[in-house]
Amino acid sequence: MSKTENNIILPGAMIGMLGGGQLGRMFTSAANELGYRVCVVEPDEHSPAGQIADEHIIAAYDDESALHYLADNCAVVTTEFENISAPALQSLAEKTLVRPRAEAIEKAQNRIVEKAFIRECGLLTAPYGVITTSSEIATAIEEVEFPCILKTARFGYDGKGQITVHSADEVKDGYAHFNSADCVLEQRIDLDIEISVVLARNSAGEAHCHPVAENIHVDGILHKSIVPANVDESISKAAQAAAIRMADKLDYIGVLAVEFFVSKQGELLVNEIAPRTHNSGHYSLDACVTSQFEQQVRMVCNLPFGDTQLLSPVVMVNMLGDLWGEDHPNWSSVFSNPASKLHLYGKKEARVGRKMGHFCILDKDIETASNTADAIFQTLCSESKC
């Protein structure tokens, strides 16, 4: 089988996936529906993606034998999340196609590098300072106004690796708490709304966006996405244009998500980049002609774009392990609503803060959809006593 850049990879081929979580599971399902086989590399033997993949290699993401197997047996390899070793991806790319490129993924692995890249693209971020040694704390503080969020530069997600600080002393204590790891000190902005864009870009440099999502977080974890977002069309278009600009600069191939803050002053600020499918794009499974996961398959295999048209207003609600309590939730409140769509990720163990699944509510009226979603979630929560 040809592995050249310009060739379409047809159904029947094997796609490699580094990462076996819920994003990998939904990608695998989309790939299988299109007739592709998927080989997942994931150290967790009970991983969500590994359970349904055609092949599951239980190994570390940088395991040499696993990477050799992918190179020999897969027409293309993609990634589920950003914390995959860039050198491992670069080595793999010498033998087979890797989409997106290691260089693009590497930009999102470090908040310091990521924020500098965003500004290089001519886009705005919240004011921030960089702390790589204790001697830089004073300089970083000069760049911001309190209150701020101190964030570790690497391996932070879903509210992890960050704390709110209100003074220089709290910054020093927080830096020590993070064992003097590299950090960014980011000013907390006067926030109006949070939104995100999921886009797909192909090897020819063409890009298509899914509809913009409005996102509500609780304790740093996405709780609810509302589509269409309640923002002016000018903001939606500016966010999509900004996301495409960054994808172009990265020479990106695949699906990319960008999170934005919209301040009460109307400023559009880039929060972070995710070089992968995204939690806030899960609504696309039920409410769009083409989901973000099918689009990812299409991009890495050099197929034409799928239609991203929104078929219905939709609200997506995350379900964390908190809802499970001592047993599985009672799903009656979800199934009793004919406009609901339940998605469970097959995780064996429920833990507080762990993403276990999500549900979507579709309705021609977005306010009705949101109220229905809230009512179902509250019922689940009250029954589990979370």
Image (cartoon, rainbow, N blue to C red):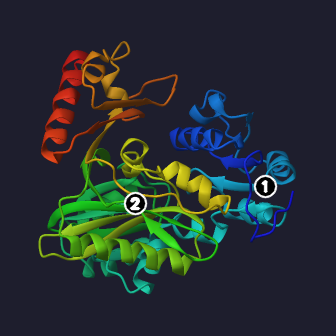
Q: Nearer the viewer, residue 370 or 50?
A: 370
Q: CA distance from mark 2 to mark 1?
A: 27 Å
In this picture, residue 357 sits left or right of residue 171: right
**Along the line of sight, which residue is nearer the eye, 282 or 42?**
282
**Identity, as a three-letter code, of the amino acid under mark 1:** Ala
> x, y (%) of residue 284?
40, 48
Side (left or right) of 241 relative to 252: left
Disc 1, SS: loop
- Picture layout, residue 301 above or below residue 351: below
Q: Mark number for residue 210?
A: 2
Residue 318, percent from left and from top: 33, 38
What's the residue at 60%, 67% (across, down)?
253
Binning the other alpha carbons within 10 Å of mark 1 as few (below 14), some (14 to 19) or many (20 upward) gives: many
Residue 99 picture location, percent across and down: 66, 62
Regarding mark 2 in the picture, which secondary structure is present there?
Answer: loop
Instruction: Please rate how many residues cluster around mark 2, counting C-alpha atoms within 10 Å: few if below 14, some from 14 to 19, many from 20.
Output: many
Amino acid, disc 2:
His
Side (left or right) of 23 relative to 368: right
Residue 232 marker: none
Q: Quadrant of residue 151?
A: bottom left
Count every numbered label the image shows and give the total: 2
- Image-quadrant location for residue 386: top left
The residue indicated by pointer 1 is 75
At 79% from the left and 63% from the top, the residue drawn is: 91
Residue drawn at (79%, 51%) of the image: 74
| Quadrant location, the N terminus | bottom right
